[in-house]
Image (spheres, rainbow, N blue to C red):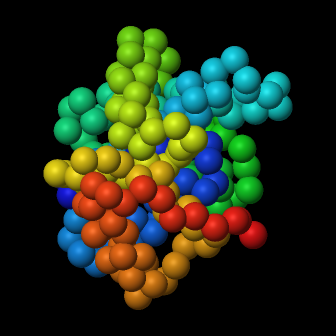
Amino acid sequence: MDVTFFFDPACPWTWRTSRWLVTVADARNLRIEWRAFSLALLNEGNVPPERTDAMTASSRALRLVEALRAEGRHDDAGHFYAELGTRTHDAGNRPDTTIVDAAVEAAGLGGAAAALDDERWDAAVRESHALAYTSVGPDAGSPVLMLPGAERGLHGPILTEVPGTDDALTIWDCTVPLMRLPTFHELKRARH
């Protein structure tokens, strides 16, 4: 894999970043490994009631992502996330069980759907989440990027909109060298 993208499908910022990364991957012929980052785990015990359904749906989706990863089906995980994000973030809906199930079917993954409700995948989700969180450190959320050979991951980049190809490649070309520098820590500005 050329880059690992840890994500929570409930996060709209993460969705935009994923579309940026897909643009870069298409232009540069990169392979993406899709992995779980759980906002439900990050905020365990502090999820507001109005977010419970979205976190439950996201947790189901992340089980499938890790099940597909275990089988080396990274492209299938990416297609599933694309279907899920289109039905949620692009359509202005919060994730729910019905939308997750529809995304599974649309991605042609009905044969893998049992993983959605198989709690045995929760350990893999926790392990993936811990790997991402440990690679970035405290005060990080979804998404997390990791490159092979880089000492640490990176939270972000957080994008307010999906850039066109030229800008997407500029962001990538600026981000990769920073991620490979062990002395690099953080760049940040307020969201608008």
Residue drawn 36% across the image and 60% down it = 184
Quarter in which the C terminus is drawn: bottom right
On the question of residue 101 being in view, the answer is no
Left or right, 63 with respect to 24, comes to right
Between 181 and 35, the residue placed more toward the observer is 181
The number of discs equals 0
Instruction: State the image quarter where residue 10 is shown.
Output: top right
Between 71 and 187, the one lying in front of the other is 187
Return the x and y of residue 96 as percentages of the image width and height: 67, 35
Image location (x, y in percent) of residue 161? 61, 72
For residue 129, say whether it is visible: yes
List x then y, in percent, for residue 65: 39, 35
Q: Is residue 12 above or below residue 21?
A: above
Residue 94 position, x and y percent, is 72, 44
Q: In the rendered image, which quarter is residue 50 located in? A: top right
Residue 159 located left or right of residue 168: right
In the image, 186 versus 176, the foreground residue is 186
Q: Up-down: is 88 above or below 164?
A: above
Q: Which residue ends up furthest to the front in the rendered image?
A: 183
For the point 74% across and 56% down, the residue is 92
- Outermost residue, top direction? 120
Q: Furthest-bottom residue in view?
A: 166
Residue in the picture at 21% in, 71% down: 29
Front-most of 172 and 165?
172
Q: Which residue is found at the position 64% from the left and 28% from the top?
A: 43
